Amino acid sequence: MSSSPVVTRFAPSPTGALHIGGARTALFNWLFARANGGTFMLRIEDTDKARSTPENTAAILDGLSWLGLDWDGEPLSQASRAERHAEVAHQMLAAGKAYKCFSTQEEIEAFRETARAENRSTLFRSPWRDVDESDHPDAPYVIRIKAPQDGTTTIDDAVQGSVTLGNDQLDDMILLRSDGTPVYMLAVVVDDHDMGVTHVIRGDDHLTNAFRQGMIYKAMGWDVPVMAHIPLIFGPDGKKLSKRHGATGAAEYRAMGYPAAGMRNYLTRLGWSHGDDEFFTDAQAREWFNLDGIGKSPARFDTKKLENLCGQHIAIAEDAALLHEIQAYLAATGAPALTAEQADGLERAMYCLKERAKTLPELLEKAHFVLTSRPIEMDEKSASQLTDVSRGILSELTPQLQSASWNRDTLEETVKAIAANHGLGLGKLAGPLRAVLAGRSVSPSVFDMMLVLGRDETLARMQASDG
């Protein structure tokens, strides 16, 4: 590992939303930087002018912010640095590490057709590689790098291990197009060097790019960052995660109401491990994360595991923080905001809502009793609990509760006593009580609801259903 301060980067292309695979790449870079007291930078690779949009850039930043991945400094626009990229290409040209190629598209295609017919490599070998400048025509040209033509190149990857490629598989790739614009491969290397990136952590679909980019580092005499190519995320069927598996974007998971802490935990564990630990806090992840823990095999996305971890994170969340996250979730999904009274009630109820809720919508469904107001609308299942007999028993219970001490033990004793008078167990009375207090069959216990609602509201709901 480099002894210089760690600098990582996430470099998304704003041609679409933040994919869950990209979110995990960003998370690994963020964790590694934070674990080592380093810097996590953001670079927007917006050189594809036709497909890059400000809306996609905003969506990517929004997704990273939702996941709590704070970056250092301002996001860098790759397109804004085109002059610097071109400058480096011209430095390589001046140093004899690159050359001007005047071959036309037709000539290149003819070369490839001949190569195919003769069953040899179709990698283009330019006839201009060693032509003296005095013999150059006055015509459009591209600038190509001089790739090594024999031997092998080896990359010591922090995840994949030692990977070797025959140099006969490397072409003299273009650095500057004939219109003077830089190619992506050049821009990435120049930006990483200028940003002082020490560790490049990215998907293993970029592994072959590392060999081509390595040629630029070598030609410029620059230090090559530590490379760490992480396996892609697969769906449950063992194929690359795609739309056919369901949601693939960070925004979609946010809209489904998965809490950010649970999402971070799950994505961290997706392809990285620390012993057998499944559930861990942000602080533990930052303390434990290292490149050694990243596996070589693709990770499989498992929604059940995600839900299980999210449930555990909801259960341990601080009430005020969870309330804040719920309010942000409602705003992000365009749902009505909570009133001050609803927010206050929800925070009071949080202690009896957090257990067993795996997503924010599940928690809100359980919280319906405190978010609704009289008259209580009942769903079909709840309404069926209110028979003439059960209404009669509830009307007996009401005056008993008016004078009871408002604590859990007394409330339980009071309800049990009334039920026993009618030869019933507590459960037989819980259904009708749940109906009048919540109007839903899914709710916290009736005693928790009574305590959260308070004496006046509890009795008002019971009396409103009478008759």
Image: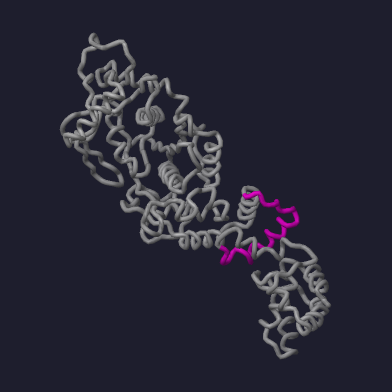
Where does the image place residue 378, in percent across and percent down from the top left? 73, 70
Q: Is residue 221 left or right of residue 386?
A: left
For residue 363, say whether it is visible: yes
Where does the image place residue 209, in percent across and percent down from the top left? 31, 36
Instruction: Look at the image and name its color scheme.
Output: one colour
Labels in figure, total: 0
Query: What range is drawn magenta here?
Result: 333-357
Q: Quadrant of the image for the N terminus? A: top left
Q: Quadrant of the image for the C terminus? A: bottom right
Q: Is residue 134 left or right of residue 287?
A: left
Q: Which residue is located at x 38 percent, y 24 percent?
A: 182
Q: Which residue is located at x 22 percent, y 26 percent?
A: 125
Where 443 falls versus 296 (above or below)? below
Location of residue 277 (image quadrant): bottom left
For residue 35, say whether it is visible: no
Where 430 falls versus 256 (above or below)? below
Where does the image place residue 438, in percent across and percent down from the top left? 72, 69
Where does the image place residue 23, in percent across and percent down from the top left? 46, 46
**Foreground: 142 or 367?**
142
Residue 451: in magenta span: no
Q: Is residue 61 left or right of residue 27?
A: right
Where 440 falls versus 258 (above or below)? below
Residue 342: in magenta span: yes
Where 224 falls versus 28 (above or below)? above
Location of residue 98 (image quadrant): top left
**Foreground: 274 or 44?**
44
